[in-house]
Image: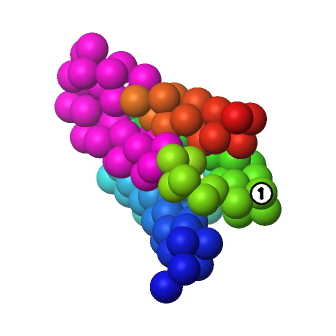
């Protein structure tokens, strides 16, 4: 398998896993909110501005929002790597770093672990910076 093909395979895998992580965030947040507010709330139109008040539901919502803040940048950088190419594989390593850090971030946030959670977030940003630097240099 030539390096370009291997990189494309890694890009597709990391992209699909990132979408799975997005779905996980949505399902986790919804499950915890439904546990608190009930299935009628979840199935209904949610015209009332009821928000879950529980700690876990709130943390899941904030973790999801945090994920969604960097996800567009990740997708854009991954797309650019796919278009321009990444013969060194460094950009793909940045993508994997972002994904793994985002996965690690979830249980740390739900458990309320300070500092280490911030370190996981910082590692995800490092992954994005590595992807961006690969494109620029």
Q: Depth check: 95 or 135 in front?
A: 135
Asked if residue 137 is positioned above or below residue 12 in the image, the reply reads: above
Q: Verify whether residue 102 appears in magenta.
A: yes
Whether 116 is among the magenta residues is yes
Residue 55: which quarter of the image? top left
Classify 120 as above or below 100.
above
Could you say where residue 33 lies in the image, as x and y percent from the top left?
Answer: 42, 47
Q: Residue at x 51, y 55 (%)?
A: 89
Q: Circle 1 sits in a helix, a strand or a loop, which is it?
A: helix
Rendered location of residue 97, percent (x, y): 41, 44
Q: Residue furthest bottom?
A: 1
Q: Is 109 on the left or on the right of 29, as rendered?
A: left
Q: Which residue is mark 1?
A: 84
**Part of the protein shown in magenta:** 93-122
Identify which residue is drawn at 50% across, 63% down: 14
Left or right: where 126 falls relative to 5: left
Specify the quadrant of the image occupied by residue 44.
bottom right
Q: Residues within 10 Å of mark 1 (few under 14, many from 20)?
A: few
Res 17 seen here? yes
| Rendered location of residue 80, percent (x, y) | 76, 53
Looking at the rendered image, the quarter that the C terminus falls into is: top right
Magenta region, mostly helix, strand or loop?
helix
Residue 11 vs residue 87, the one in the foreground: 87
Q: Nearer the viewer, residue 117 or 77?
A: 77
In percent of width and height, residue 12 lies at 57, 72
Left or right: residue 133 versus residue 28 is right
């Amino acid at each position: 398998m030539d390096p370009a093909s291997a990189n494309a395979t890694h890009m597709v895998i990391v992209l699909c896993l990132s979408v799975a992580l997005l779905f996980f965030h949505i399902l986790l947040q919804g499950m915890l909110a439904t546990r608190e507010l009930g299935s009628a709330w979840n199935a209904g139109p949610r015209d009332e501005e009821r928000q879950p008040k529980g700690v876990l539901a709130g943390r899941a919502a904030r973790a999801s929002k945090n994920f969604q803040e960097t996800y567009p940048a990740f997708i854009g950088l991954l797309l650019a790597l796919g278009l321009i190419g990444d013969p060194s594989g460094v950009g793909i390593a940045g993508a994997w770093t972002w994904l793994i850090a985002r996965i690690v971030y979830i249980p740390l946030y739900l458990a309320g672990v300070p500092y280490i959670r911030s370190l996981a977030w910082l590692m995800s940003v490092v992954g994005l910076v590595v992807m961006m630097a690969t494109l620029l240099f």
